[in-house]
């Protein structure tokens, strides 16, 4: 998906001389695609366990606490 995003953004920037308009058009397509991917991922989590989302969120919260913790 990242390669597709990069290619679409590059094409948009080449085809439109107004970079802000090119980026806005790219973002509209990218956000729609990302929403579809996120919905599919959520379906997969629900299939695994009814508590899967809470587990994944807890995992990322623990990583954030580790990153933000003072280091000696």
Image (spheres, rainbow, N blue to C red):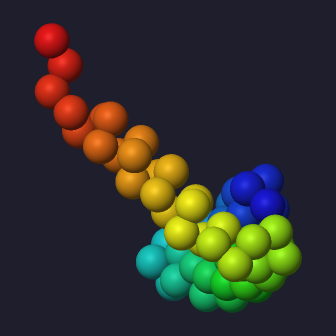
Q: Nearer the viewer, residue 55 or 5?
A: 55
- Relative to 16, 19 lies left or right: left
Image spot of residue 17 (x, y percent): 56, 75
Quarter of the C terminus within the rendering = top left
Q: Residue lying farthest top?
A: 72
Q: In percent of the image, x 57 and y 61: which residue is there?
A: 55
Q: In percent of the image, x 67 and y 84: which residue is there?
A: 35
- Relative to 27, 50 lies left or right: right
Q: In percent of the image, x 31 and y 35: which residue is there?
A: 67
The vertical placement of 72 against 35, above or below, is above
Say which quarter of the image contains residue 68. top left
- Relative to 44, 72 lies left or right: left
Image spot of residue 53 (x, y percent): 60, 71
Q: Nearer the viewer, residue 3 or 47?
A: 47
Residue 62 in view in this figure: yes
Image spot of residue 56 (x, y percent): 58, 60
Q: In percent of the image, x 73 and y 84: which residue is there?
A: 39
Q: Residue lying farthest front?
A: 50
Residue 37 in view in this figure: no
Image spot of residue 11 (x, y percent): 74, 67
Please state the total of marks drawn on the protein image. 0
Quarter of the N terminus within the rendering = bottom right
The vertical placement of 38 against 1, above or below, is below
Q: Nearer the viewer, residue 15 or 41?
A: 41
């Amino acid at each position: 998906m990242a390669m597709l995003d990069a290619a679409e953004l590059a094409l948009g920037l080449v085809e439109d001389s107004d970079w802000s308009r090119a980026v806005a058009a790219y973002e509209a397509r990218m956000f729609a695609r990302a929403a579809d991917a996120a919905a599919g991922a959520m379906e997969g989590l629900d299939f695994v366990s009814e508590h899967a989302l809470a587990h994944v969120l807890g995992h990322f919260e623990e990583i954030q606490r580790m990153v933000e913790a003072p280091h000696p």
